[in-house]
Structures are given as C-alpha cells and as structure tokens.
Amino acid sequence: MDTQIYPLLLTPVYKDYIWGGTSIPSRFNREPQPGLCAESWELCDHADGMSIVSNGPREGTSLHDLLLEMGADLVGTASPTDHFPLLVKIIDAAQKLSVQVHPNDDSAPVVGGEAKSEMWYILDGAPGTQFYAGLVAGTTVETFDAALEDGTVQNLLKSHPASPGNLTYIRGGCVHAIGEGCLILEVQQNSNTTYRVYDWGRVDAEGNPRELHVEKARQVIDWELDPAGATPSEPIVDGPNRSQDLLVTPYFRFGRLNIETPFHVTNDGRSFHMLFVTKGTLTVATEGGKETVGAGTTLLLPASISEYALAPEEGPCEVLRVSVV
C-alpha cells in the first residue's frame, strides 16, 4: 500500500451568507470564524470552494490536484476523473433560506447552469423547526406567479418537520427552502447553481433585496414533482454494531453506522468513502495511516483503500458515510 494513501482530513471552506448562524465552529470544536458561518463546505472541488488536505504527506494539496494525480484511485471507477462528483456541506440556518430551485440533468443545459439534486440529513432542529419541499397539489405556473406577486408563496409549499435524524431527497426541479433553526448535512451533485424565487422580504445591511431568478426558475421547476422521502434499508447488524443505507440515488449513496466495538469495512474500489462523525470519538485505521477524530469531523478515504477499521474511543460512535453508486 502506498503510504501516501491514508484517511484524509480536509480544511473546511466557510460561507457567510446573510441567513447564516454562528454555531458550526463552536458546536464542532473548530477555530472561531468572523461574522456569520452559514455553510461549511466539507468536501468540495468547485470554482466557488476547494478542499485542501490538512494532514499527512498530502497536506496542502487541493482536492482537484489530488484527483488529477490519483484519478480513479481517489474517486473510484464508478465516476469520471475530471472533477469530484459530489459537494458535501454543513448548513446552519439561523434564518429561513430563500425559496429556491435547482436544475436537473435535463434542464441544466437549457439555462446554462449546473445540475443539482441533493439530500438533507437533519443534524439538529428545535421542536417545531420545519423545512419546505415540494408544491401543494394543483399548483400551476399561473397560481405560482400570482403567489409571487402578492407575497404568499409559502402557502404553496409543503412543510415537513425537521427532526434530528430525518432525511429528505430534493431532486433537481423541486421547489424548496430550509426553515430557521435547522442544522443540516447536505450531500449534492457538484454544483453551486441556485435560482431564488422568493426571499421572505429580506434585505441586506444596505436595505437591498437579494437578486431573484424567477425566469430561469420557471424553466427548471418540475410542476408535477412530488419529493419522495428516503426508504432506509434493513440495518445490517454485526454484533453490537449496525450499518444501514438510508438513501441510494443515481448520484450518491448515504448511510449511517452505529459503532460500539471495532468494525472492519471493505471497499471494492468503485467509490471513495467520506465519513462524517456525528457522535463520539472515532479512530479510522488503514494500512497507510490512522486518524482519531471527534464529532463534526469529515474524513475522505480514497477508493484504492480496499479495507479500513473503525474503532470507537470512550463510548459508542455514530458515523455518516457518503459514496457514489
């Protein structure tokens, strides 16, 4: 095994959008950030944000350069090797996000954007916290336009409780918004295309509203789309440990591991594995090296790591795992 292939830690890329909060650094024991910390891009190879390796022999290397060097050894044989297929972020919504939509694979070329289907895993949300996904039955272009005109778009949105551990899949073309008080892990296609249609009357410090993109949004909204919730697989129990796929889409696979004793994992090389620790302290060991990390830490395991071991330290761990199909 190449000793330079090991569990990779990545420097987060923080975004200070107007609706953001301040809890990501404090909650996850990270360096304080000035101002708002709306998003932490945990895994990204994009013009708007780039992950940099922060540990071991590859320290200082960008994810994009690593992909150019390693190719399928990093990303796996199931993905192209010209760019990383996914973008993973933490979202801290102190205020509601805008009502928005992303293009899907078919509509993205029409509007000149990047396709984005995504999923949300609720890390935390106070009682009564909501998110919005999908339009109520019978919504048409005409009724939607009328609601935009009189500021009642929220009446056309389907609301859902944002309880910790809940998961939803937001396909491209689905109108959606994240409610205030949500802390979310988002997994998405590698895209930063968003078309805002309504921003709750919000203005910036100078009193200016944010730009809306109603015309492009009309072209990409799927008026018949009914978002489907995740259908978890049956958990795979290995003694006191449990592994479960929560969502499998054409773009990503998302699962949860509950680990109480050392746990051995194999990988067939078709995909990288990204791990996000939600509870406890975890040691991840490979032939090339090991890392012991706490809650709120993201690790990237290159696809060429054919096996690795997970061991909880000082009590059980909960780990979220992301890969491609």
Image: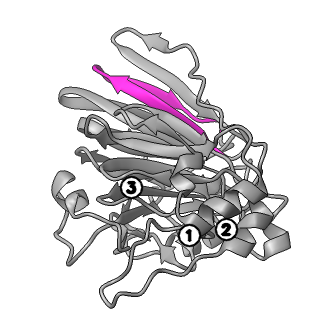
Answer with the quarter of the image where residue 103 lies.
bottom right
Q: Which residue is mark 3?
A: 90
In the image, which residues are magenta?
252-268
Is there CB contact under 8 Å for labels 1 and 2? yes
Q: Which residue is mark 2?
A: 83
Would residue 317 appear left or right of 76 to someone viewing this image?
Answer: left
Which residue is at 76% across, 58% downward? 142
> Is residue 309 in view?
yes
Compared with 226, 206 (above or below) is below
In the image, 141 versus 19, the foreground residue is 141
Q: Position of residue 284 (x, y in %)?
A: 35, 40
Q: Secondary structure at mark 2?
A: loop
Instruction: Specify the label residue 45 is tagged with.
Output: 1
Tag in front: 3 or 2: 3
* Among numbered discs 1 and 2, the one appearing first in the sequence: 1
Answer with the quarter of the image where residue 37 lies.
bottom left
Would residue 100 appear left or right of 112 to someone viewing this image?
Answer: left
Q: Position of residue 212 (x, y in %)?
A: 58, 76
Is the residue marked by circle 3 packed among few (<14), some (14-19), or many (20+) residues within 10 Å?
Answer: many
Is the residue marked by circle 2 packed among few (<14), some (14-19), or many (20+) residues within 10 Å?
Answer: some
For the residues labelled 1 and 2, the Cα–Cα distance comes to: 7 Å
Instruction: Specify the label residue 207 is tagged with.
Output: none
**Which residue is at the far top?**
239
For the residues labelled 1 and 3, the Cα–Cα distance comes to: 16 Å
Tag in front: 1 or 3: 3
Q: Looking at the picture, which amino acid does disc 2 mark?
A: His
